[in-house]
């Protein structure tokens, strides 16, 4: 027989430090003292992600959520909740919380996340179509096939005001409407699953966890705009996502949810997968379409937009995976339901891949308008290893850094652009005090330089020139004039590049130069890297007083740059030192310092 | 199954829905649902899957279904496993390895006691649970 109650005590590091252990012990001894130790189990859990209200105690099966619990409260919790079955009201979290931006009734009050795109991820077996169907799967397609006109569908999307989640934020209903109005016999539906930002895996997880939601959305779009053929463009480096899509497609076909005469409606729709080789530029829609056609992945100027002239010159709706995953829910629950979530400028939610120097890294989906502080501190549990927050990069290599003073900015398409970054596809990389901002900018820039297709001069030549200048800065040979020139080149690239890759490539530099000018100046004027990351600007020295002459460092040094007799102070030959840091890690006496 | 008509699809949905509500997969009382996205697999979910199968086999427990699901978003505690047992609230376990998996079978499934230090919370409410309306 199951127990009457399970009492979960938060054992996250933050709660742990705020007396969670004492509460745990107190609950155990109280349950014994009051004679119910056989009816309850006290369980230590992982972080609930609500640390500022800690220590947190949750009692199941009622799901009562107690905050700021003290060891003295254990007696009352056992006597009232467990024995009499009455919640201890004074300890319950006050429900009138800070959810101003999301007045949706069924949000659980203490959870900052709200999952539309990831609704089925972690709930269903992605390789079993029946489980998707059981969770209202293909109901939206039924509605579109039998109850709604194309006008109705476009209208719901318009009320929802869903904007493209690939980064640019273009209204989805407008794209669909352009294609719908195009007078062409053949039209196409395309899913952009070419997720290429370093540190981003939102689309991969969606496809792996809920492939049918994308297939359903594609068929809905096909019916709405008059297309009978769809393509999913996905990188070959996502083998599991590809396999699950193939399984899902075969199952949908078997059930008659894809193919000819779907559910007896007379509507035909087929999907094919196209594998990309992993070029970042193929995430740009015109380059992606070129790649599907078997051409080299290079963008072409827009207009004409793909919605009018896309795949093989035919009108094509192309949206990002995350955008597609929203579609069935909008049809199911209505555009006005969707439009209540988020901010005036941006409705719905956004999925972020929260990585870097963060305690609880993970995939998070939050209503638009959630602040960076809520994401990083409440959901992410703050900075790992108790270090200081320095900045967060949103938008991957196309975005910029956001600093401490802007942590309380509600996130939406407009607000991030105003800060010199962008929403991007949803990569969110947190940096701490040990990260060198110039080094990070260099990493992103080198990525976009490598990935530039080389077609247009501003991106090809501008990117290379920027990289050369940045290299000088990290080598300690940069000048103030170089910094000015970087801004000049960056601004020119933004204006003159053919596609978003070149237009956004300077963003990491421009935004870090704006917010962290001091750090650039330290590299250029003082020839120092404050975080000790730029190897050319640091030197390793042996502190005479601390060196006992154990020879450990000299034996490990790969270039034999360290000399000295046994039991005598050693010396590093700076000319031979390659700054690998092995001596620093080897020395047990803290006798090596970085200057 | 062959191609369906609209009526057949609706019928299938209703029958599967009640299955899912009972969480009764093929007549089994318990469910072990393992997070098998790329993230979970990279963190060792396949080994966890094997450990569950071995332990269930060794204890001759044949009323437990072991299934897979996608990523729950709790990357920092992968591999994750959800346990659904009669009369118990569904529980999500994180940082599960082969040892923890065996402990889950012994404590959670056999004794209906949760395994301390590995219980985590689903990161958000389910928007589909009330029929998605």
Image: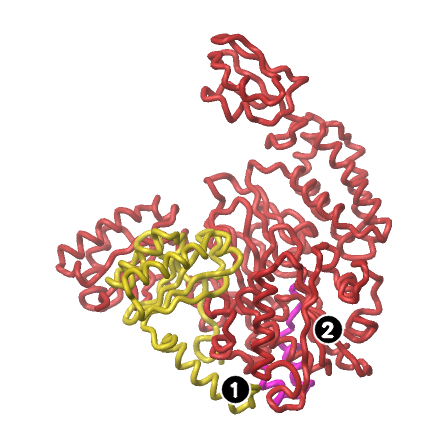
Q: Determine the chain carrying the residue at label 1.
A: B
Position of the C terminus of chain A, as image quadrant, is top right
Alpha carbon separation for disc pair 2 and 1: 28 Å
Q: Determine the chain carrying the residue at label 2.
A: A
| Colour that chain B carries in the picture | yellow
How many residues crowd mark 1 within 10 Å: few (<14), some (14–19), many (20+)? many
Q: Is residue A344 above or below residue A222?
A: above
Residue A577: percent from the left, percent from the top? 64, 20
* Residues at discs 2 and 1 both on one chain: no
Magenta segment includes A464: no
The magenta segment is A141-166
Residue at point 56%, 50% (across, down): A407
Position of the N terminus of chain A, as image quadrant, is bottom left
Residue A317 numbered mark, or none: 2
Label 2's element?
strand
Left or right of A489? Residue A275 is left
Residue A95 numbered mark, or none: none
Label 1's element?
helix
Residue A191: percent from the left, percent from the top? 68, 68
């Amino acid at each position: 027989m199951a127990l009457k109650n399970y009492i979960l005590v938060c054992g996250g590091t933050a709660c742990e430090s705020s007396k969670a252990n004492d509460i745990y012990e107190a609950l155990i001894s109280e349950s014994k003292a009051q004679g119910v130790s056989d009816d309850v189990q006290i369980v230590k859990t992982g972080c609930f992600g609500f640390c500022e209200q800690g220590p947190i105690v949750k009692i199941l099966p009622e799901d009562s959520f107690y905050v700021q619990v003290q060891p003295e409260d254990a007696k009352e919790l056992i006597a009232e909740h467990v024995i009499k079955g009455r919640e201890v009201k004074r300890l319950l979290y006050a429900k009138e919380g800070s959810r101003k931006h999301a007045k949706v009734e069924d949000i659980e009050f203490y959870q900052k996340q709200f999952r539309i795109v990831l609704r089925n991820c972690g709930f269903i077996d992605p390789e079993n179509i029946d489980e998707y169907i059981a969770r209202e799967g293909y109901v939206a397609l039924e509605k579109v096939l039998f109850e709604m006109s194309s006008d109705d569908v476009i209208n719901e999307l318009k009320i929802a005001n869903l904007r493209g989640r690939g980064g640019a934020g273009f209204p989805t209903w407008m794209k669909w409407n352009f294609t719908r109005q195009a007078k062409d016999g053949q039209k196409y539906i395309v899913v952009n699953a070419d997720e290429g930002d370093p540190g981003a895996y939102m689309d991969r997880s969606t496809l792996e966890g809920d492939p049918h939601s994308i297939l359903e959305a594609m068929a809905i779009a096909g019916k709405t705009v008059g297309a009978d053929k769809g393509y999913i463009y996905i990188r070959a480096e996502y083998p599991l996502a590809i396999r699950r899509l193939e399984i899902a497609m075969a199952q949908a076909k078997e059930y008659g949810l894809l193919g000819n005469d779907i559910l007896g409606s007379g509507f035909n729709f087929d999907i094919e997968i196209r594998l990309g080789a992993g070029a970042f530029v193929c995430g740009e829609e015109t380059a992606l379409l070129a790649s599907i056609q078997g051409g080299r992945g290079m963008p072409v100027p827009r207009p004409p937009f793909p919605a009018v002239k896309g795949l093989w010159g035919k009108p094509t709706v192309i949206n990002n995976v995350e955008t597609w995953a929203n579609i069935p829910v909008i049809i199911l629950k209505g555009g006005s339901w969707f439009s209540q979530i988020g901010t005036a400028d941006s409705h719905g939610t956004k999925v972020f891949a929260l990585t870097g120097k963060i305690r609880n890294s993970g995939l998070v989906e939050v209503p638009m308008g959630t602040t960076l502080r809520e994401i990083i501190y409440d959901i992410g549990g703050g900075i790992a290893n108790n270090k200081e927050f320095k900045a967060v990069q949103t938008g991957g290599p196309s975005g910029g850094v956001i600093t401490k003073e802007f942590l309380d900015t509600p996130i939406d398409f407009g607000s991030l652009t105003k800060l010199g970054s962008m929403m991007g596809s949803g990569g969110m990389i947190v940096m701490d005090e040990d990260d060198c901002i110039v080094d990070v900018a260099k990493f992103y820039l080198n990525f976009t330089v490598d990935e530039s297709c080389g077609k247009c001069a501003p991106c090809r030549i501008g990117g290379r020139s920027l990289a050369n200048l940045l290299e000088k800065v990290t080598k300690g040979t940069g000048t103030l004039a170089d910094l000015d020139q970087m801004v000049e080149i960056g601004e020119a690239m933004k204006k003159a590049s053919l596609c978003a890759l070149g237009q956004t490539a300077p963003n990491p530099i421009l935004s870090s130069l704006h917010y962290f000018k001091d750090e650039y100046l330290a590299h250029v004027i003082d020839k120092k890297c404050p975080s000790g990351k730029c190897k050319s600007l640091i030197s390793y020295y042996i502190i005479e007083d601390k060196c006992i002459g154990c020879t450990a460092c000299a034996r490990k040094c790969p270039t034999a740059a360290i000399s000295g007799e046994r039991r005598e102070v050693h010396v590093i030959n700076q000319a031979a030192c390659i700054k690998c840091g092995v001596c620093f890690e080897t020395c047990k006496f803290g006798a090596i310092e970085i200057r | 199954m062959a191609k369906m008509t609209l009526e057949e699809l609706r019928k299938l949905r209703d029958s599967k829905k009640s299955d899912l509500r009972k969480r009764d997969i093929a007549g089994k009382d318990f469910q072990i649902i393992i997070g098998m996205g790329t993230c979970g697999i990279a963190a060792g979910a396949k080994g966890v899957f094997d450990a569950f199968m071995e332990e269930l086999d060794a204890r001759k427990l044949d009323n437990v279904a072991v299934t897979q699901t996608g990523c729950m978003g709790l990357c920092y505690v992968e591999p994750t496993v959800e346990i659904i047992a009669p009369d118990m609230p569904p529980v999500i376990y994180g940082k599960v390895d082969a040892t923890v998996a065996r402990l889950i079978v012994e404590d959670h499934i056999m004794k209906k006691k949760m395994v301390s230090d590995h219980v985590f919370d689903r990161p958000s409410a389910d928007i589909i649970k009330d029929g998605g309306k």
